[in-house]
Every structure is written in structure tokens, then in C-alpha cells.
Amino acid sequence: MSNSIPKITLNDGLTVPVIGFGTFNLNGNEGANAITNAMDVGYRLIDTAYNYENEGTVGEALRRSSIPREDLRITSKLPGRYQTYDKAVTTIQESLYRANLDYYDLYLIHWPNPIQDTYVEAWQALIDAKKWGLIRSIGVCNFLPEHIDRLDKETGVKPSINQIELHPFFNQEDQRKWHEENNVQTQSWSPLGRANAVLQNEQIQRIADQHNKTISQVILRWHYQLGAIPIPKSATYVRQLENISIFDFSLDDTEMSTIATLTRPDGRNKDQDPATYEEF
């Protein structure tokens, strides 16, 4: 399966699969088993974070797997409470120790936390960690265009990826357009809307029926055709395989437009607006 998953090249030259695997709340032995199963199914992009408290679980899954390290792309994220330069450097090192890794393929600032106003300092730490070989590619999560513009202007380095909340009820059209124009890859967290009402949507169900696919598969295919990288999570083998089996059909323009009409101004799952939200 993994050989059939397309890859894209980020603005710094790193290649990544067009779909990944989320690991939030996958912890301990059960979590390690689920992540190992996901790699066996074919996932090669694995997403974790310092605040998920499961970097060690991801590392254990890697040790249990026979997949060569160079074939994997492992992501982690810097929490808001460690955004000063020295703390960020130490946290990156601690992230590596937790997972027993020599490097992360991707490391992201988890939220901009604009009230703290230390994200540029944190970004400089990521830039240096990349120079030291601790990270292959650096990016951000939940950054608005003005935040990314500031990083670029003050450091001369643009993120390779911005991981944002993106699902049919919140399709982030303007942000995605800005990413495309500025050569920043869009990545989708909560791509299935945290299994909320979007998975019971009748319009998407009709599209799924036309293709003999599930609603989840249609939504993940929608992400792919938007040019975004979804990172769905599931602890079960059957659902993991279902979520990755999206490359044998395509949505036409009418179907893509139908899904586009579902977006809502208040579509965020938890009202986490990056302009004001603070994550620690």
C-alpha cells in the first residue's frame, strides 16, 4: 500500500506522503500497537507532539516495526510554555530523547500564542536545531498569514508546513489560497471533524454511495484533491486501512463544490482561534 501513496516535495526539499497518521490519545502499549499497525498498513508519515505525552510511544512503535527509519517521516511539536529560545532548544532535545530518535523529520511550533509573543524566538531555535541536524524540516501549526509573514521577515526562513484545523465544516479556503501563493504546504488536523456530525452528513453520504466508498474516504480524498495533507487517527486496523484507501477514485468538480458548500463561519470544533488562543 505504501508504494501507491503519492509524495510531495516541501519548499526545503523534504519529500513527504500526501496522507499521514495522527497519534493524539494513542498512549502506552495499546498506542504503540496501534501505531505499529498503521505503519504495517502503509502509513509513513506519523504525527505526534510534546503535549500528546506519547513521543515515547511513537518511538516504541518504530522499534517494533520493520520499516526502515529512512522511509518514515516523524513529526513532533513544540508546546507554548517552552517558546523562549533556550527552553525550545532543550525541549527539542527532550523530544528526541523521549522517542529515542536521532532526528525528527518535521518539527513544528504547535500554536503561535500571540499574547506571549515569543514565537519568533522559538522559530529561531527550530532554525538552529535544523542546522545542528536535529530536525530535517521545520514548520508551524495554526499560524495565520501575518504570523508566517513575520517569521519570514525577521529570520529569512519560511515554514515548510502549516498544520491547521481543516475539515468540510471549516475548509479554510482563504488560508489555503495564501499557503499556495506563498509555497507553504497545508496540512490538515482533525480532517474528519473529530468524528462529529460531518460523518453523518447526507450530502457527503450521497457522494460516497456514488463511489461505493465511506464518508471518511470521501472526506480524505477531498483533502487530497485540495492539495492538503490529512492526518487521520484510528486505533483499529480496519479503519486505518479504510482511511488510507483513497487513491483508486476521484471526486469531480461538482462533488468538490458540494463539499465546499458545507463550510461554516463558526465551523471550528473548539473555537480555537489562532489570533487569540493560547496553548501551553
Image (tube, grey):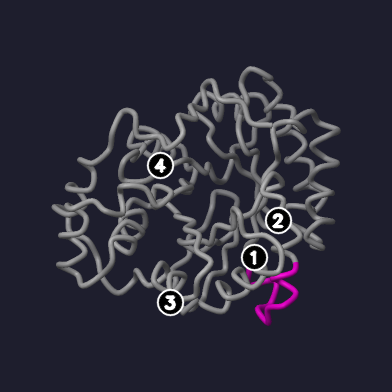
| Identity, as a three-letter code, of the amino acid under mark 1 | Gly
Residue under label 2, please give it: 54
Above or below residue 201? Residue 217 is below
Q: Main secondary structure of the magenta part?
A: helix
Residue at mark 1 to residue at mark 2: CA–CA distance: 8 Å
Residue at mark 2 to residue at mark 4: CA–CA distance: 32 Å
Q: Residue at x 74, y 33 (%)?
A: 124
Q: Earlier in the sequence, mark 1 or mark 4?
A: 1
Residue under label 4, please give it: 180
Mark 1 touches mark 2? (CB < 8 Å): yes
Give the extent of the magenta segment: 60-72
Residue under label 1, please give it: 31
List the single residue furthest toward the top. Answer: 115
| Identity, as a three-letter code, of the amino acid under mark 2 | Asn
Residue 52 disc label: none
Whether residue 65 appears in magenta in the rendering, the answer is: yes
| Identity, as a three-letter code, of the amino acid under mark 4 | Glu
Q: Report how many numbered discs are placed on residues in the image.
A: 4
Q: Residue at x 77, y 37 (%)?
A: 125
**Secondary structure under badge 1?**
helix
Residue under label 3, please give it: 4
